[in-house]
Amino acid sequence: MNRVVARSGLVVAGAILAGVWFGGNGATAAPEKDDPAVARARKTVRMLDDVYKTAVVLITDKYVHDEADFPAGSAAIALFSAIEKKGWHSVRLIDVSGEPYDPENVAKSDFEKNAVKALKSGKDYVEEIVERDGKPVLLAATAVPVVMDKCVMCHPNYKNAAKGAAIGSLVYSLPIE
């Protein structure tokens, strides 16, 4: 059956055959990593990652001039909350440095904890396919590196971080459709 799925203002068209994710016993099975639906979910994560990170850099560059200004990271967290409330997907900003800006930004799930370890070891992307409410979901974590000198205005603990080193992560939970 053909379906059109809207994600973050973009329309992703795809054909999904009925019964593709059903095993012989009628139970839902997670799609394989090379499944076209997984490839679409990965592509959506890459697009969202570019949009969110570009927005944070632009906000920081154009609107954050001193510590009294509203931090771009806080704006991003508010955006993530609004997106999740609308039912699109969830994304969380978590700390990788070991010195979180906010205590809420620590790795909580096993996936997040494993992703932090992988990102600290130099990877820039980690993923896992899980099942939630009987449906497949792509969990993905991307590295958030220090990219601007202004970052240390709110995060002085990053002053000695190597440019490009992961100090945080965006963790996505995206339905695979």
Image: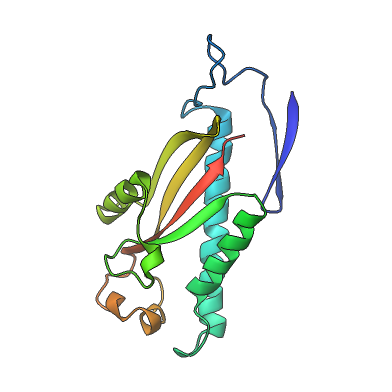
| Residue 94 horizontal side relative to residue 57, left or right | left
| Residue 74 picture location, percent across and down | 51, 73
Q: In this view of the protein, can residue 147 be seen by the observer?
A: yes
| Residue 118 picture location, percent across and down | 29, 49
Q: In this view of the protein, can residue 145 be seen by the observer?
A: no
Above or below: residue 12 compared with residue 73: above
Residue furthest front in the image:
133
In the rendered image, the quadrant that contains the C terminus is: top right
Above or below: residue 92 compared with residue 62: above
Residue pictured at 55% horizontal, 29% vertical:
134
Residue pictured at 40% horizontal, 78% vertical:
151
**Pick the front one: 8 or 91:** 91
| Residue 2 picture location, percent across and down | 75, 27
User: In which quarter of the view is residue 18 placed?
Assistant: top right
Above or below: residue 158 compared with residue 144: below
| Residue 171 picture location, percent across and down | 45, 53
User: In which quarter of the view is residue 169 placed?
Assistant: bottom left
Color encoding of the figure: rainbow
In the rendered image, the quadrant that contains the N terminus is: top right
**Pick the front one: 171 or 48:** 171
| Residue 121 horizontal side relative to residue 101, left or right | left
Residue furthest top in the image:
24
How many marks are shown on the rendered structure?
0
**Pick the front one: 127 or 24:** 24
